[in-house]
């Protein structure tokens, strides 16, 4: 279930991380893992980044690395910053509804 939810919110998570700073794919995956999402496979991460790039919310460029081959760095466009703000607002509204919906529900774990 957690993986299904992540697929639904990965774009928003990436936009939020890129609000903080530009980063490359592995760096984003590591930051997601440190945030509590666990390991995100490249087959999940990179299609999401490509989708954001095709929507002109993210731009990518290659840069030299001090420790290996060049890296593809991603950063938000102006449209991406606006989309991040809008999506965060929508998420907060959704979260508030879910909090109200689940607040009175007592669920026993098996």
Image (spheres, grey):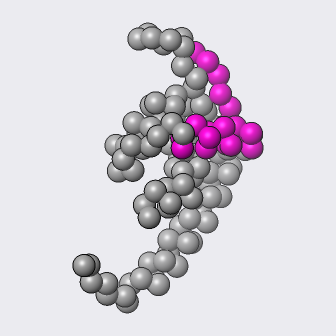
**Height in image: 96 above or below 1?**
below
Q: Which one is nearer the viewer's eye here, 61 or 4?
A: 4
* Frontmost residue, 2 versus 77: 2
Residue lying at 25% horizontally and 79% vertically, measured from the top left = 110
Q: Judge left or right: residue 4 versus residue 11.
A: left
Residue 51 sits above or below residue 6 on the image: above
Whether 16 is drawn above or below 58: the answer is below
Which sits in the foreground, 7 or 94?
A: 7
Q: Is residue 46 above or below residue 69?
A: below
Relative placement, left or right, of 79 versus 97 is right
Residue 47 belongs to the span the image colors magenta: yes
Q: Picture coordinates of residue 35 (x, y %)? A: 37, 47
How far across and down, in percent of the image, does residue 61 sit?
A: 65, 22
Residue 31: which quarter of the image? top left
Q: Is residue 78 visible?
A: no
Q: Is 86 part of what is drawn in magenta?
A: no
Q: How many marks?
A: 0
Which residue: 66% across, 37% down?
A: 50
The x and y percentages for residue 91 are: 56, 64
Please name whichever residue, 40 or 75, is drawn nearer the observer in this view of the structure.
Answer: 40
Segment colored magenta: 44-63
What residue lies at 54% left-to-right and 19% top-to-bottom?
71
Write the residue at 54% across / 14% down.
70
Task: Describe residue 38's horizontal placement relative to residue 18 as left or right.
Answer: left
Report if residue 67 is visible in the image.
yes
């Amino acid at each position: 279930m957690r993986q299904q939810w992540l697929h639904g919110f990965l774009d928003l998570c990436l936009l939020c991380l890129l609000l903080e700073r530009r980063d490359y794919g592995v760096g984003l995956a590591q930051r997601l893992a440190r945030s509590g999402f666990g390991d995100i496979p490249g087959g999940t991460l990179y299609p999401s980044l490509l989708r954001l790039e095709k929507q002109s919310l993210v731009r990518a460029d290659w840069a030299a690395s001090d420790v290996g081959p060049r890296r593809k760095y991603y950063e938000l466009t102006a449209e991406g910053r606006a989309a991040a703000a809008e999506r965060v607002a929508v998420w907060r509204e959704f979260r508030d509804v879910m909090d109200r919906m689940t607040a009175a529900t007592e669920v026993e774990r098996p």
